[in-house]
Amino acid sequence: MGAKAWILTGRLLQKGYHFSLYGRLIHFSRVHHVSVGSRQFNSIARGEKNRAVKQDRVSCARTPDRTCQQLGLLPMRSIIHAYDGVTSLWQSSPSPLYRSKPSLNFSLCEVLSRPYSSKGSNVPHSSLDIMSSLNDVFDALGNGDSISGRKRSRKQLVTAFMESYQSLPHISLRNDPHENSSMRKETALRELASMPPNTDMIDSVVNDLQESTGKPATIHRTHQLWSLCEPPYYRLFTWILREDSGLSFLVKFREDVRVFVRMLKHRKRAASEELVSAIVQMDHDLKGVLSIQFAPHVLELHRITYSASPAAVIERIALKEAVHPLKSLDDLRNRLKEGRRCFALFHPLMKGDPLVFVHAALLDNIPRSMEEIDAGTADGGKGQVSPKVAAFYSITSAQPGLAGIDLGQHLLKSVMLELQSEFPMCIQTFVTLSPLPRLRKWLEGEMENEADNQCESKLNVSSLLTMQERRDLEIVLKSSTINDVANDLSRVLSGDHWLSNPDVKSVLEPILLRLAAHYLLFEKHKGKPVDGVAKFHLRNGAQVYRLNFLADPSRRGMHQSLGLMVNYLYDLSRVEENANEYEFDGKLPVSEEVGQAFSARPQS
């Protein structure tokens, strides 16, 4: 057996197969004396049936499944069944997508190397399942009915597709674009997005439309033509939504689509422009489908508490928190106690899965820092009886598949109404304490451009400083010249030692506040602020109320926004007016304090 194994390994390496897979099979055959010779392996590599496989069925079946599971291999009976399925699928496949022998060979190799799971059937979900279900779904989409000959209903086809798709490995930017992907989700996304409409049926309906007489027949044919011209995956999405878990599946499906789009754009050479545009269009269409399903009137608002909410919901909120990650279990308890509030939106069909959630603190004054929020709500907080201010300090989307669907606006409005009903005569002010996630990256890029003088910077940092501020920088930083402001700022902000120097902090405070005001008010893309958080709140009708120096001195806060945070004020009497002015006129509502902070710059 040893000589045969080495000869077989050499042949497989010549064919380009991975050694570790067949090394494991060879080791398996050595230890358990299973008759798997080179002829059987060659027949698998060619993608053709061989009688020798059937002859060895009995000897293969004698090997216990438990032994295979311990070795991390599939039982041999499952391998044979998978091999038979691959070959018969290739011979009977009506779609040209899967008539390529190499893809089937690699699919089988991946099936053989997949770790065995004792749960469920001995034959795991694999590329065989997704290929078969895709072919069935394609035929059903093309014919508008269930597949003739297979006698499977539309529900069975959709269920098979969903189960086989969910069993595949996740899409990752680390995947090799040149590696065979028949067992990955990319295959399903690629083929679904590229599937063309049924041109024969379209031509038939067009001819009938031209020959039709009478208004009812014309209207009927027009609607029929409209339906046929839609991408075929539209009907698949409609079928999936009829399933119990269909909505949740489509949310996860769109998450995969968005990752796939980023992967294709990241690897421009690995994908054609036609494929990228097809995937982007499918993402856009799926977003439209989900926007209808997650309409505001359908969603439910629930308060999250440590004692009453399900543990699974609390765990998901803790894991998905993106603005201020949790430090400990005590931190989680503090965010859910009486001095604070946590609300989340749910869909009736996804009750245990929050869509978006917000954390708020009930205070007496508008907070200037996260430290004030912690102090104002310590030991239950003084403001929970008669608070005057509700400060939102974290808004997080828990579903990447719902990106671009504005659930945050509905959540904030619903929470404001809920808090007003809970404290009808108390809370009159709604504000946020929000980060500027890209401020540091933007400022470092501008200072680098100005210091290098290699490309013209949009922002001249030196022009935003007064002569007195330049002299103060020269003194506290011990610089040799007051002209190289960009280099001095870049050098001092690259570390965190200045946080412990009161003199440096007092000099940097007005400078950083002015730079942050410029970033918020004048750095735009397509007429809107480049800062995503600012864009969200201004679109909802908020006002840029105040900039706060060192409001979040945590490691994350310093890395993203140099510790600066913004208060956005929601004046309910002006929310609609502010939103309209921002959307149609491009006007940014700014408080007098922020305007004065920026107007203090030297006049050129």
Image (tube, rainbow, N blue to C red):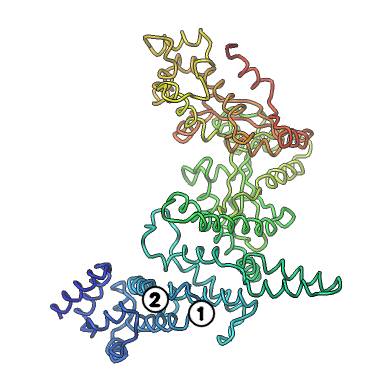
Relative vertical location of residue 457 with respect to residue 245 in this rendering, above or below: above
Q: Earlier in the sequence, mark 1 or mark 2?
A: 1
Number of numbered discs on residues: 2
The quadrant holding residue 581 is top right
Disc 1 to disc 2, C-alpha distance? 33 Å
The image shows residue 405 at horizontal and vertical percentages of 64, 50
Instruction: Identify the residue at horizontal 46%, vertical 31% (top origin).
Output: 558
The quadrant holding residue 604 is top right
The quadrant holding residue 235 is bottom right
Query: Which label sits on residue 118?
Result: 2
The image shows residue 377 at horizontal and vertical percentages of 60, 35
**Secondary structure beneath disc 2?**
loop
From the image, tell me which residue sits under label 1: 94
Mark 1 crowdedness (10 Å alpha carbons): few <14, some 14-19, many ≥20: some
Can residue 387 be seen at all in this image of the molecule?
A: no
The image shows residue 254 at horizontal and vertical percentages of 56, 58
Toward the viewer: 515 or 425? 515
The image shows residue 265 at horizontal and vertical percentages of 47, 50
**Secondary structure beneath disc 1?**
loop
Toward the viewer: 455 or 379? 455
